[in-house]
Amino acid sequence: MKAAIYLAALCCFAINAYAQTLPATRNKFVVVAHRGNHVDVPENTLAAIEETIRCGADYAELDLRTTKDGQLVLMHNATVDKMTDGKGNVADLTLAEIKQLKVRSSDGKVYRVPTFAEALQACKGRLNIYLDFKAADVSETWKQLQAAGMDKQVIVYLNEKEQYKAWHNTVPEVPLMASLPDGIGTPEQLESFLKKVRIAVFDNITAPEMMAVARKYNVAIWLDVQKPNEGPADWQAAVNKGIQGVQTDHPEALIKYLNANHLRDGVTATASLQ
């Protein structure tokens, strides 16, 4: 579960007039493949994107970072140590150096760290992106999204309060996702917050009275269910809360479960998802 970010300090911003419309999906109940579908291939790779498309998920959650020479690449951790045969911070390595690295895998195949541009081309017209905005420049990110024709196929997850201001000022219409900030624990507090801050999706609201406020302000709820032993009990528990989607480490198995139980389109969606 991602740590809650502190957006409360941003309430001084007046709510903008732009509607944050979520990308279109074939299904009302949204399935997000965490770091791409990485059950059989490495996470945050072009192969994980292809596996996400193959299994029928609606979004690939991809992590964005910046190299020493200002290039955007996919990598969850701040260092390349865990995922590749190299060492060092992404921010201290050039793109050429990162492109020489091999992503660790168990199938004997060679995988490389993709650039954001490569990921966008793989997803264009085929898959939405849930962009976990780790460390990148908003203007450059948006430039690449527009150049790839992917600006209507993305939602941005915010990790720090400063990121809200940057996206708000640069691209106010892009749909933003966040965790509910600490200190907002009542429906009244949530309503006050949503009158000032534009968020399209929360990932950590489960109390019915808080969910009612989210629905009033057209905010969807996509819960994180990913964990090593996630399964039908976790999926059904999430669905039973009346949410609009989940993020999972097992998108193919989850989709089969949803289809078998007539749940993929059986959840009432918010207006933005209809």
Image: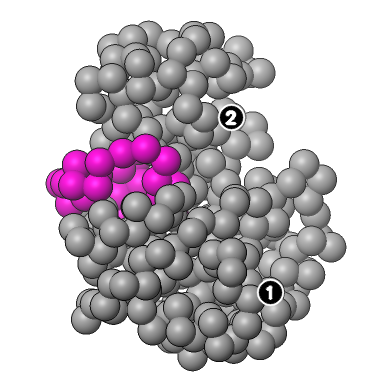
Residue that mark 1 sits on: 206
Q: Nearer the viewer, residue 88 or 101?
A: 88
Let me know if residue 122 is in the magenta part.
yes
Label 1: few (<14), some or many (≥20) within 10 Å?
Answer: some
- Circles 2, 1 touching at the beta carbon (< 8 Å): no
Above or below residue 41? Residue 108 is above
> Whole-percent x and y of residue 252?
65, 51
Q: Quadrant of residue 229?
A: top right
> Whole-percent x and y of residue 126?
37, 53
Please name the residue shown 68% across and 74% down the image. 206
Q: Is residue 25 left or right of residue 115?
A: right
* Secondary structure state at the residue bearing disc 2: loop
Residue that mark 2 sits on: 41
- The span from disc 2 to disc 1 (Cα, nearest Å) is 32 Å
Please state the extent of the stretch shown in magenta in the rendering. 119-147
Above or below residue 39? Residue 223 is below
Quarter of the image with the C terminus is bottom left
The first of marks 2 and 1 along the sequence is: 2
Whether residue 262 can be seen here: no
